Image (cartoon, rainbow, N blue to C red):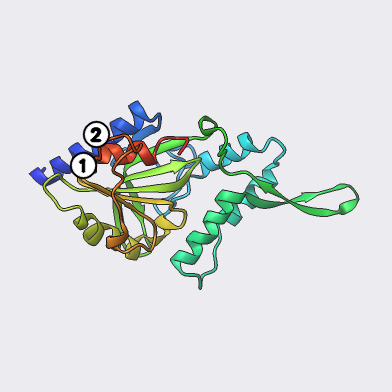
Amino acid sequence: MNHEYSENGLVQDAAGHQLEQELGWKVAYAHNTEQLGENGTFGRKSYKEILLVRYFREALHRLNPWITEVQIAEAESKLKDHLSTASLMQINEEKYSLIRDGIPVTVKRPGGRIEEKKAVVIDFQNPDNNHFLAIKELKIHGDLYRRRTDIVGFVNGIPLLFVELKASNVDVQNAYTDNYTDYLDTIPHLFYYNAFLILSNGQEAKVGTLGSKYEFFHEWKRLSEQEAGSVALETMLRGICKKEN
């Protein structure tokens, strides 16, 4: 293991420890340990899957007591589907609307009348009623390429958070130019549901959203106006990954 990679690992371990010990996320390490299959580690049937259906379906059951298995399958299909001609930004915007507003599913009323009802995907009022999982070193396959991400954060099985880490002696911009832009080309489906992109070398951290150029990634310097500013990853994770946030 070279020095740069071991330094990267230290930053990753520190981030994982904070997510787990301070912020209450479940944290898992996937590299060379993940078992595929419905009853496997995360329920993925292939490395191409990015929506963790096991946790997504559990959340639908928990948050929508009225929902049936047929409606759950319908909600899953609607969240996964997209137009083949749609751009990555268009897909992301569509998924955002479903996550925010709920997924419409078919409800049959007496007399054969058909209606739509929104299935809640995330409980925004009660943060602890959701499942928070951060996976380190998750293997993701595209149509042609294979990649392994530093940290992907899932809420109810939906990959909302992407964290790309560098060693402390490497400029944060390298995480953007060397890794993030490569992932956009090779495993774009990772970002269908994404809400936050974090780039960091531990000492410095920047956050952006899908489609942002590097100059529009910004530091998260403080949690309140009274605090002294800090650009460290620790501050950013505390601000963005706190469950109620």
- Quick one: which residue is furthest to the bottom in this view? 85
- Using the image, tell me which numbered label, if any, was put on residue 132: none
Amino acid at dot 1:
Gly
Q: Are marks 1 and 2 in contact (CB under 8 Å)?
A: yes
- Image height of 8 relative to 211, above or below: above
Amino acid at dot 2:
Ala
Which residue is depicted at the point 21% across and 42% down?
A: 202
Which residue is depicted at the point 38% across and 30% down?
A: 23
Q: Is residue 35 left or right of residue 80?
A: left
Q: Which residue is mark 1?
A: 202
- Quick one: which residue is furthest to the top in this view? 21
> Closer to the camera, 4 or 199?
199
- Quick one: which residue is furthest to the right in this view? 111
Crowding at dot 1, Cα within 10 Å, few <14 / some 14-19 / many 20+, comes out as many
Q: Which residue is mark 2?
A: 14
Q: Is residue 68 left or right of residue 132?
A: right
Question: Which quadrant of the view contains residue 231?
Answer: top left
**Which structural element holds mark 2?**
helix
Q: Is residue 70 left or right of residue 88?
A: right
- Quick one: which residue is furthest to the front in this view? 226
- Image height of 189 relative to 126, above or below: below
> Closer to the camera, 115 or 48?
115
